[in-house]
Image: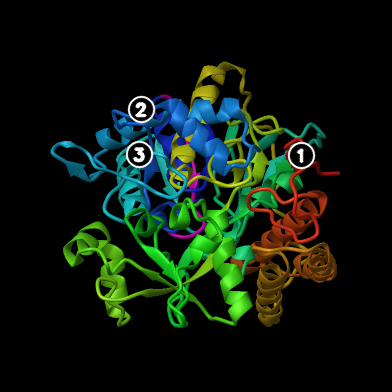
């Protein structure tokens, strides 16, 4: 039986917090199809250890949360967006409670923790594995909804636009996406009246990243190729504390370890070095400050890692607050209740992305976007801890609401051309993909990492241009595979990051360059427009 790829009202690309929030809101009235690249749990949402920021404490205010977000974002945030998201946070938490997310409680009230950059305790959490609990609750609700079809192992290649209509149109209107079914090797056209891009970030552009394997910037690259603007791609957040272990890749040690008293030390001298960089806030300084401090220590003293130590706190307290991390580390021979954890910075979050408005609309008619693949104006030059899941819920809901409000104006998709693979063959050179992937991630880490210079950025740009010709040639001649699609998208995102970084002649938030250490007078977004 041929799979029905056309009988949906709305297509959602991505099965994380943003995509499933939108799907559940839309499914009250419409038929929705959700495409996931891997299995339905494989996105970034399930990996989020920290929590969700919301004003729930008696002494806290929306104004305080807005201020903390703007301070972390180094003035590049859009204030209207920040207020829009933060004022909707308590309602988002209520909806998650209704879905059965088992948030930690103290005496019946939600237990709130504090993280770097926050002036109050305002992080709701499920131990130190909030994302997993949220993902499980959203998936359960989506699976039980007869109006939602979820398809795993579908790797999206490109958005379907007017250019793909049987009767060509240059309108830029989006009608869905072409996706590879990895089980059959077939590419199908999934069409819909409206499409929501919720494909996550581009963390895997870097050699060291806390992002899951599939975070290859697919949504950003697809939207860019289709004609949407992207903004602030140079604002790549590096998490200060990723476990340093050669066997275990990208295990994050949550911000909350520092929030609950963890301290950073030079591993050889025992010096508590944050006092040299930010004497007032110490380990509770925003992530970019802490990440640069650790990067400086590692480079200056030739270290492999620094120490994060919370062993001065009572052992029961540590075990109770960080059960997942404690258990994982014990399995690796590290007891965090008795000694320090070796940590290094790693890429953690993509603050830039597809330009959207408060309704989640992109520049392209029919295309909405939500979550880490977007630049909504919430994060500015640096994301405040635990604002990321919040953005997914608020914009997933906003996009769904706008689609429902204007549904009568959406027209059915026209006839779309089938995917053409008449001129391609199976590749016998998979090693080329692996080589190019490794090369991109290495030079991005070395040249476009935590501390940048114009010369390094130009070197990265030259390498990207050379690789582009090779990848285009390969893509044009061989059948698509998930690895090839991801390499093409990684390369596109690397190019956008470098272009954006070269345009910013200042050091603001996450973009720190030795050639322009000062701030420009006016904060300006770096907006790139496709030709």
**Marks 2 and 3, how far apart in space?**
14 Å
Q: Is residue 212 visible?
A: no
Circle 1 residue: 166
| Residue 33 counted in the magenta span | yes
Q: Which residues are magenta?
A: 29-39
Earlier along the polypeptide chain: callout 2 or callout 3? Answer: 2
**Which secondary structure dominates the residues rendered in magenta?**
loop
Say which residue appears at 68% left-offset and 48% top-offset: 508
Residue 406 percent across, percent down from the top left: 57, 18
Circle 3 residue: 122
Residue 4 vs residue 92, the one in the foreground = 92
State which mark lies toward you, 3 or 1: 3
Secondary structure under tag 2 reads helix
Residue 399 vs residue 151, the one in the foreground = 399
**Marks 2 and 1, how far apart in space?**
44 Å
Residue 451 percent across, percent down from the top left: 68, 63
Residue 509 vs residue 196, the one in the foreground = 509
Secondary structure under tag 1 reads loop
Earlier along the polypeptide chain: callout 3 or callout 1? Answer: 3
Image quadrant in which you'd find residue 98: top left
Say which residue appears at 33% left-offset and 41% top-offset: 121
Residue 219 percent across, percent down from the top left: 62, 49
Earlier along the polypeptide chain: callout 2 or callout 1? Answer: 2
Residue 91, numbered label: 2
Position of residue 50 in the picture relative to residue 36 (left or right): left
């Amino acid at each position: 039986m041929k799979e029905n790829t056309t009988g949906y009202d709305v297509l959602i690309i991505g099965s994380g917090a943003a995509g499933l929030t939108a799907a559940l809101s839309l499914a009250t009235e419409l038929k929705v199809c959700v495409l996931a690249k891997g299995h339905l749990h494989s996105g970034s949402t399930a990996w989020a250890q920290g929590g969700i920021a919301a004003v729930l404490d008696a002494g806290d205010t929306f104004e305080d949360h807005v201020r903390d977000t703007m301070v972390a974002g180094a003035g590049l945030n859009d204030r209207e967006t920040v207020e829009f998201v933060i004022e909707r946070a308590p309602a988002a938490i209520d909806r998650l409670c209704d879905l059965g997310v088992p948030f930690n409680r103290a005496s019946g009230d939600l237990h709130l923790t504090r993280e770097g950059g926050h002036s109050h305790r305002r992080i709701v959490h499920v131990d130190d594995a909030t994302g997993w609990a949220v993902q499980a609750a959203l998936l359960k609700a989506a699976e039980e909804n007869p109006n939602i079809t979820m398809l795993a192992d579908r790797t999206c290649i490109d958005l379907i636009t007017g250019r793909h209509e049987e009767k060509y149109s240059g309108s830029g209107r989006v009608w869905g996406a072409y996706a590879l079914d990895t089980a059959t090797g077939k590419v199908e056209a999934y069409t819909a009246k409206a499409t929501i891009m919720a494909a996550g970030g581009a963390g895997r552009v870097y050699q060291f990243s806390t992002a899951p394997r599939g975070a290859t910037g697919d949504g950003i690259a697809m939207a860019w190729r289709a004609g949407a603007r992207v903004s602030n791609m140079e604002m790549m957040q590096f998490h200060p504390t990723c476990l340093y272990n050669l066997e275990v890749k990208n295990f994050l040690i949550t911000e909350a370890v520092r929030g609950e008293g963890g301290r950073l030390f030079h591993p050889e001298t025992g010096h508590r070095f944050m006092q040299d960089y930010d004497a007032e806030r110490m380990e509770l300084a925003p992530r970019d400050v802490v990440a640069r401090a650790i990067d400086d220590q590692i480079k200056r003293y030739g270290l492999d890692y620094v120490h994060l130590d919370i062993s001065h706190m009572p052992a029961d307290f540590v075990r109770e607050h960080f059960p997942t991390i404690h258990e994982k580390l014990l399995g690796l021979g590290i007891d965090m209740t008795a000694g320090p954890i070796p940590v290094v910075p790693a890429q953690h979050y993509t603050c830039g992305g597809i330009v959207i408005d408060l309704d989640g609309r992109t520049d392209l008619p029919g295309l909405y976007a939500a979550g880490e693949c977007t630049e909504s104006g919430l994060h500015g030059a640096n994301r405040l801890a635990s604002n990321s899941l919040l953005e997914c819920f608020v914009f997933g809901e906003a996009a769904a609401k706008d689609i429902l409000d204007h549904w009568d104006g959406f027209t059915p998709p026209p006839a779309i051309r089938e995917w053409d693979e008449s001129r391609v063959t199976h590749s016998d050179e998979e090693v080329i993909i692996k080589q190019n992937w490794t090369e991109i991630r290495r030079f991005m880490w070395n040249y476009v990492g935590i501390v940048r210079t114009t010369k390094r950025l130009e070197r990265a740009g030259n390498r990207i241009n050379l690789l582009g010709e090779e990848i285009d040639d390969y893509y044009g001649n061989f059948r698509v595979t998930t690895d090839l699609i991801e390499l093409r998208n990684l390369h596109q995102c690397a190019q956008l990051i470098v272009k954006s970084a070269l345009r910013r002649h200042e050091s603001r938030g996450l973009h720190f360059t030795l050639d322009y250490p000062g701030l420009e007078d006016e904060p300006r977004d770096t907006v790139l427009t496709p030709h």
